[in-house]
């Protein structure tokens, strides 16, 4: 049982240190944590072939409409996103990352990726497969806990 407790403590510390890294790296380019989270959501959406709208960002980041507008205005003013009207429904706005956002994001996270890859390179492929499976399941469990917390908050 001690190993499980230690793993839980290490994952908590990893989360804290990741947040600290994001904050420190974002300061260099005057990006707030929410800005970086929005860009990360946009990268994931692009990989999945999903169109990003202000509504999607609002939902994913759990922001109010005014806060979402302020976020998009900041990203637009910084040259990280562009707004485009939908070809199907002109009332709907689609958000697209710019090349500047991709370059900035890569520069922000390259040091973290380099350090983590150096650690991963110390493990054989079969152990990496086990770690990949564990991380996938831990991520799914985290999403389930988030959804449960949101449902509990909505029940009040």
Image: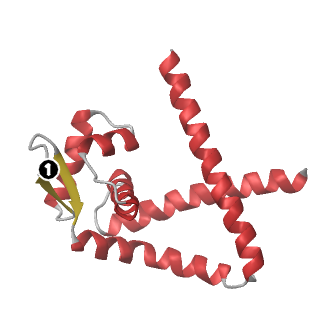
Against 107, residue 93 (above or below) is above
- Say few, some or many: other residues with alpha carbon within 10 Å of mark 1 (under 14 / 14 to 19 / 20 or more): some
Q: Is residue 32 left or right of residue 75?
A: right
Query: Residue 9 placed where, x, y %?
Result: 74, 53
Query: Residue 127 placed where, x, y %?
Result: 77, 75
Q: Nearer the viewer, residue 111 or 93?
A: 93
Q: Residue at x 75, y 68 (%)?
A: 130
Against 120, residue 40 (above or below) is above
Secondary structure at numbered mark 1: loop
Q: Quadrant of residue 106?
A: bottom left
The colour scheme used to paint the residues is: secondary structure
Query: Residue 17 placed where, x, y %?
Result: 57, 61
Q: Residue at x 50, y 60 (%)?
A: 20
Q: Nearer the viewer, residue 105 or 22?
A: 105
In the image, farthest residue toward the top: 156
Q: Nearer the viewer, residue 151 or 3?
A: 151
* Residue that badge 1 annotates: 86
Exactly how many numbered labels are in the figure?
Answer: 1
Q: Residue at x 24, y 34 (%)?
A: 65
Query: Residue 135 placed where, x, y %?
Result: 66, 60
Against 77, residue 62 (above or below) is above
Against 24, residue 4 (above or below) is above
In the image, farthest residue toward the right: 1
């Amino acid at each position: 049982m001690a190993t499980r407790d230690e793993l839980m403590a290490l994952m908590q510390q990893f989360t804290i240190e990741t947040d600290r890294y994001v904050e420190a790296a974002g300061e260099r380019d005057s990006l707030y944590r929410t800005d970086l989270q929005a860009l990360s959501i946009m990268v994931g959406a692009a990989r999945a072939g999903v169109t990003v709208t202000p509504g999607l960002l609002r939902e994913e980041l759990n922001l109010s409409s005014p806060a979402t507008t302020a976020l998009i205005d900041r990203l637009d003013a910084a040259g990280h996103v562009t707004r485009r009207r939908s070809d199907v429904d002109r009332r709907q706005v689609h958000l697209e990352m710019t090349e500047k956002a991709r370059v900035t994001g890569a520069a922000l996270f390259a040091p973290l990726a380099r350090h983590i890859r150096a650690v991963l390179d110390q493990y054989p492929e079969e152990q990496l497969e086990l770690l990949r499976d564990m991380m996938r399941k831990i991520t799914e469990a985290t999403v389930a806990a988030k959804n449960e917390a949101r449902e509990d908050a909505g029940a009040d």
